[in-house]
Image (spheres, rainbow, N blue to C red):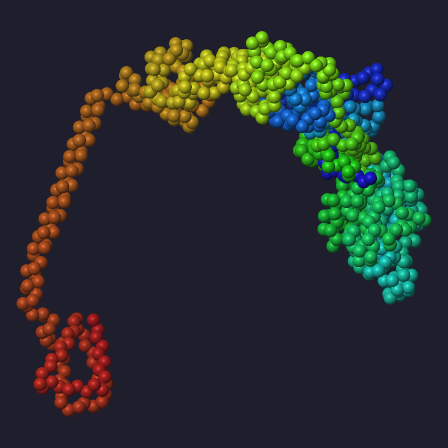
Amino acid sequence: MGTRSFASPITFEERRGRDDRCTTAADDPTRSVTCSRPMLAVQSATPVTLAETHLGNAAMIPLCDLKALCALLTLLLLLLLSVRSGAAEQRCSSALLSSCEECVRRGPECAWCSQERFQDGAHVSQRCGSVSELRIRGCEEAFIENPQVKVEVNATISSSQVAPREITIHLRPGSEASFMVEVRQLERYPVDLYYLVDVSASMQDNLDRLKSVGLALSHQMKQHSSDFRVGFGSFVDKPVSPYINVHPSKLINPCSDYEVHCRPAHGFIHVLPVTENMTEFTRVTQEQRISGNMDTPEGGFDAMLQAAVCKKDIGWRPEAKHLLLVMTDQPSHLTLDSKLAGIVVPHDGRCHLQENIYTQTSSMEHPTVAQLAEKLLENSVHSIFAVDQLQYQWYEDLVDLIPGSYVGRMYPKASNLKDLVVHAYKKLLSEVEVQMELEDDQAHLFWINVTALCPEGSSSSGNTKCSRVKPEQTMHNVSNQVYFQLTVGMLSCPEGDVLMSVRPVGFNESLSVRIRPLCGCSCKHCQETPDRSSCSNNTLPESTDTCRAQRNAAVCSGRGTCRCGTCVCDSSRLGNIYGSFCEMDDFSCPYERGMVCGGNGRCVSGECACVPGWTGEACGCRTSTETCLSDEGVICSGRGKCVCGRCVCDDQRRSGDFCEKCPICHSSCQSHWSCVSCHLSNGLRSDAFQRCNHSCAPLVDYVDDITELVRGKYCLYPSSEKCHYRFLLDLANDRPQLLISRHPAACVWSRRYFKTFLSVFLLTVTLGLGLLTGVWQLLRVKNCKFRSKPEQETEHTTEKDSSLVPTTTEKTITYRREPLPNHTLEMHKEISVTVLHFLSSDDAVSLDLNFLIELELLV
């Protein structure tokens, strides 16, 4: 059966300091720790140092803030309980329920009452309900079957890296449980490094470099490891077409065309188990020769899986860190690529080495990425990809799918291989990640959530990894240890116990979690079956007196039939009818918050019988007044009454949980004049605060410069000395604050008012008269100009224009009748204005239009 790995890790809290829910069986040889809790109450386990930090921070919070926070949390809790209570009743109520097993499978809120003669006459399904509902119906606590969710920790197994190593969880369908896992990263581990080298022809330079770098890498890794060992293996590709040339000569020597002797292509050959003999490692690497194939991708996934699962052949030590160094310059074939060669058998994930050669390379597909990641995690193997620059992006996307892997760029001729491996090892040690494994056929029945609590204090739900963890942090500093908080929930009942593994990536230790479903009941008589044999043998008429609450009352209250002296209540679509005389039901009483009697009482004969602490027609009012007490310990701050656990304010303008808020009570300026007057009459001295408390609702203070204040409402108060005082009303706080200026804004007298008014009046009249005079003068001048203009135009028409009289500077041009020579006449004349008159008469001269006269007039 396969297993499914979850991306969300499980966490457990090793409870060295147990709380009141956990009891340690000191006399028990197994020394198991049992932690039980109420249903759906998630256990939160936090390291002591974090808890102390939280308490220290809480001590710095003001007391008033803590009270307000507690009140808010109480209201939220009550709301949550009411909602969950209604949901639980709906989930647990079903007419099809007939046994305790069916009831507890409905959900973690459902319980079964095994008490005899419980709700006589009611259907057997009424025995199922929430614990609070069964108590209200009259079921005693000892007869309520309610399997509890709990976590049991086996503290007897010692561990150096993962704690605890074994726990047992008891879960009901729909319930959840939480625990913590502590992971410690050691500072110096034994290290097993296995070289898995691509020996295709393109890797010739890198292979030559490897022959000389192995010894130097061994010396450098010994600085970070207590015991360093190396091994070696090679791969090329599947030796079938179309991956290689299957010509007989090419099978023996794939490089025959280049006159180079190469070794035959192979899927994977295990050459050297991990050893501390570096001389042997150097000899083996120097004997390696290249091979060849036809396509670009290589068979790296095949070789990686065999190197991971063949633990005995490779020589992986259980206590060591396992590093698989993959050196290649090409990507790897994926699963579907095998179909090109006609290979359709899926990889089984097992070891198939015979005489150090992978024998199933030609008959099984390449493994999937998920299958490869699962086997690497299962065998605690870290993958280091040393790849060419051109293939870096391909492998960078791959490492996101393989937990505990690292990719680095390999320079030409593997010149940086030593530094790459050391850096990769440090990087892998600085990351702590957990993975979970669950059987495939059971995985759909559970859900898992993980929260990583990293040394730097960060935590986020769904995070399975902590980065930048220093090994010495987890060894010498308890506050920097790595924790993972895990919550496991069960959706429905499996057939039996389910095993789950929580495994930190690359660690050789893991946590085993056994989940035991709580899908049955422990009661021997969980279903009442009354014996009526004596009634069936009686041939006399049945008496109905025992089915009447009173002598003159109706049989079974008119809502049932009397059988064998016992009432069998009728069924109703409205709800349940029950009782010895069918006098009770759960639907004819008043409703509160969608529940009969508010969920705080029983419905008896149409009236609510409230439980202690509740009152009212629908049991919706609390009898206690604790919820109405303000911070000062006064009910509703002395401004209201406590009704049903809530404050009803006397003044409708007030609001708040304790009638402490009134935004509009003190918002007008005039409402504070009496307060300001009191303080001014006392000279704004310190003793005025006590004398004026009766007339001042807000807090009062004095300021020298009120203009510097920004927040609030500015107001003016006219004093009896004819001065205005400015004050500011700040309503931003819960209680208004009044700030009065020590210095008046302005002081005025009646005589000064008269002088000011007279000056403004005379200035206004003077400016008005001057403006009218100016306008009148402008209109008069314009009228005079308009009258003189027509006379001037008449004189112009009678007089002759002087510009037309001949002067000595003018020339007279005479035009003769005979035609003039055909030449251009050019004339120049300097005049101010030239007027040409063309006269038409009988003796008008005819002008030859062929003449071109150019006149140049200079003005």
* In the image, residue 288 above or below residue 481: below
Placement of the N terminus among the 4 image quadrants? top right
Residue 78 sits in quarter: top right
Of 497 and 831, the residue lying toward us: 497
Picture coordinates of residue 141, whole percent (x, y): 69, 15
At 94% from the left and 46% from the top, the residue drawn is 280
Residue 421 sits in quarter: top right
* In the image, residue 853 above or below residue 220: below
Picture coordinates of residue 54, whole percent (x, y): 65, 23
Picture coordinates of residue 719, whole percent (x, y): 30, 17
At 5% from the left and 64% from the top, the residue drawn is 795
* In the image, residue 821 above or below residue 96: below
Residue 695 sits in quarter: top left
Picture coordinates of residue 789, whole percent (x, y): 9, 58
Of 41 and 318, the residue lying toward us: 41
At 79% from the left and 27% from the top, the residue drawn is 167
Number of dots carrying numbers: 0
At 88% from the left and 51% from the top, the residue drawn is 360
Going by the image, does 848 lie left or right of 699?
Answer: left
* In the image, residue 336 above or below residue 444: below
Placement of the C terminus among the 4 image quadrants? bottom left
